[in-house]
Image: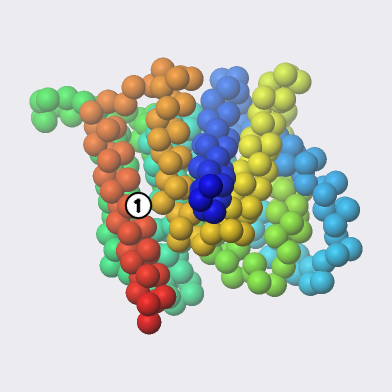
């Protein structure tokens, strides 16, 4: 067996689990607040993580960071998740997932603005293609250009997906800057617990928590899928590099297409196919440029 086969399969498995996670909110009753969904997700993740954290916390050699670091990360996580839930309830699964996979381009642009890192031209091009592809998907198919119409639900859904990708990029940038100074288990556990604290009062202000036990149980799968996805990803990255894993992460777009068709009967329209193709092209350009730069750096 090839030594990299298992890590690659784990990366693909994590892509499927993360895709399944964003699909779960579609099963919530109509009118359910995005913050109610987010609350259930963070609650289920905390129930999974806290026992492990309690057992392992004495082994941590690094002290905890200042509270504002964890609070800021939690707010970004809640923002990203809430926008993703709104997007998935108002736009096709494959479109939302394709845009969310562009978070890397948003990370690089934010790094250039906040951390003074110089963005590559390929990443800027990828960002423009991701946004442009998202815009194309909101137009209803019509051969008469003078009567082109726009679906309001889709335009808000696509806009939410783009904002979610931006928030995700900010979260990745923050994690990248603090990962060397903290333990990943403590960081993820604290953020999950703080996510409960942030989302609960907002959910109460937006109508309260009215989900039945069976509905809450279904939504709790988000936390399970997220935890398993992180476990698969972390295990894979211990055996292969991030550059080697990156191309396989984009299998999530194919999983989104498959789940959207099998579970919700979504068949992308010509505009949605075109928009998805443009978005994926942008992602592939950014990935190719990153892999090429890594090869050049290793050969020097």
State whether residue 69 appears in this view.
yes
Name the foreground residue: 199 vs 13.
13
Q: Is residue 125 above or below residue 192?
A: below
Residue lying at 89% horizontally and 63% vertically, measured from the top left: 58
User: Is residue 213 shown left or right of residue 173?
Assistant: right
> What residue is pinned by disc 1?
283
Residue lying at 33% horizontally and 66% vertically, measured from the top left: 292
Q: Is residue 174 above or below residue 298?
A: above
Q: Is residue 211 above or below residue 22?
A: above
Q: Residue furthest bottom?
A: 300
User: Which class describes the residues within 10 Å of circle 1: few (<14), some (14-19), or many (20+)?
Assistant: many
Residue lying at 48% horizontally and 54% vertically, measured from the top left: 245
Residue lying at 32% horizontally and 42% vertically, measured from the top left: 134
* x then y, percent, for residue 125: 27, 59
Judging from the image, what secondary structure is the residue with disc 1 in? helix
* x then y, percent, for residue 283: 35, 52
State whether residue 157 appears in this view.
no
Specify the quadrant of the image occupied by residue 238.
Answer: bottom right
User: Is residue 189 shown left or right of residue 267?
Assistant: right
* x then y, percent, for residue 59: 86, 65
- Image mark count: 1
Specify the quadrant of the image occupied by residue 32.
Answer: top right
- The quarter of the picture where the C terminus appears is bottom left
Name the foreground residue: 226 vs 34.
226
Q: How is the image coloured?
A: rainbow
């Amino acid at each position: 067996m090839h030594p990299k086969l298992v890590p690659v399969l784990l990366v693909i498995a994590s892509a499927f689990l993360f895709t399944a996670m964003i699909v779960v909110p579609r099963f919530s009753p109509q009118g359910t607040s995005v913050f109610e969904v987010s609350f259930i997700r963070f609650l289920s993740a905390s129930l999974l993580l806290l026992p492990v954290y309690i057992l392992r916390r004495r082994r941590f050699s690094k002290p905890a960071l200042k509270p504002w670091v964890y609070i800021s990360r939690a707010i970004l996580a809640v923002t990203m998740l809430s926008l993703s839930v709104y997007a998935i309830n108002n736009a096709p699964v494959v479109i939302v997932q394709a845009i969310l996979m562009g978070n890397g381009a948003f990370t690089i642009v934010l790094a250039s603005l906040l951390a003074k890192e110089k963005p590559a031209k390929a990443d800027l091009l990828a960002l423009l293609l991701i946004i442009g592809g998202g815009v194309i998907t909101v137009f209803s198919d019509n051969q008469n250009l003078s009567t082109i119409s726009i679906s309001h639900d889709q335009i808000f859904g696509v806009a939410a997906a783009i904002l979610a990708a931006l928030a995700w990029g900010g979260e990745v940038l923050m994690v990248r800057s603090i990962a060397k100074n903290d333990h990943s288990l403590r960081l993820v556990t604290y953020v999950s617990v703080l996510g409960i604290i942030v989302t609960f009062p907002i959910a109460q202000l937006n109508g309260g928590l009215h989900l039945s036990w069976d509905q809450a149980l279904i939504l709790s799968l988000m936390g399970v899928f997220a935890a398993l996805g992180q476990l698969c990803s972390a295990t894979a990255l211990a055996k292969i590099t991030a550059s080697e894993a990156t191309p396989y992460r984009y299998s999530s777009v194919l999983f989104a297409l498959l789940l959207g068709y099998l579970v919700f009967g979504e068949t992308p329209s010509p505009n949605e196919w075109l928009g998805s193709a443009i978005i994926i092209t942008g992602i592939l350009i950014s990935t190719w440029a990153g892999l090429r730069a890594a090869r050049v750096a290793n050969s020097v």
